[in-house]
Amino acid sequence: MKGMYDPFDVFKINYPSVPGWEGAGKVVSSGGGMMANRLVGKRVAFVRIVDGNEFKLGGCYQQFAIADAMSCMTLPDSIPTDIGSMHFVNPLTALGLVEEIAKKSQAAVQTGAASQLGRMVI
């Protein structure tokens, strides 16, 4: 991605940047440490590395991503990887939307662009 998509200057993004807040996959290597070493070979869900308000090391929409072991959650075999990749950001966003809607209205309208987030709201 190229450009500035944060008009409120909340995050420091170094461009070009790979998008993606969360993902899932198999851990192929470890940078060291007991927690990280125990994840090698396992399927995990993870969130991208953000240090304070600065994005680090690219997002999750790439073949290989670097994640902090503390941001990884092992996935049981019963959860498909594509579902596990939506474990944090979308569910919390959906919960927040539903709570705000309930405070102010009895209904909500979703567009086709709502995708997985829209399914979670339903």
Image (cartoon, rainbow, N blue to C red):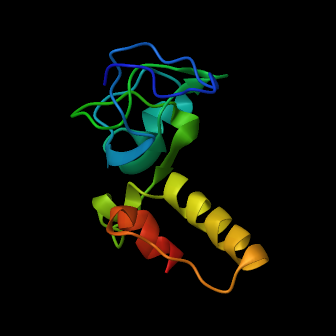
Residue 82 image point, x, y percent:
30, 60
From what the image shows, is residue 43 above or below residue 37?
Answer: below
Residue 8 image point, x, y percent:
63, 27
From what the image shows, is residue 54 above or below residue 72?
Answer: above
In this rendering, would 48 be left or right of 24? right
Residue 12 image point, x, y percent:
56, 17
Q: Of all residues shown, which one is farthest toward the right?
A: 103
Q: How many marks?
A: 0
In depth, the one of 49 and 8 nearer the eye is: 8
Say which quarter of the image contains residue 105: bottom right
From what the image shows, is residue 9 above or below residue 100?
Answer: above
In depth, the one of 26 and 92 nearer the eye is: 92
In depth, the one of 42 and 92 nearer the eye is: 92
Residue at image location 42% in from the left, 74% down from the top: 119
From what the image shows, is residue 31 above or below residue 34?
Answer: above
Q: Is residue 6 visible?
A: yes
Residue at image location 45% in from the left, 64% down from the top: 117
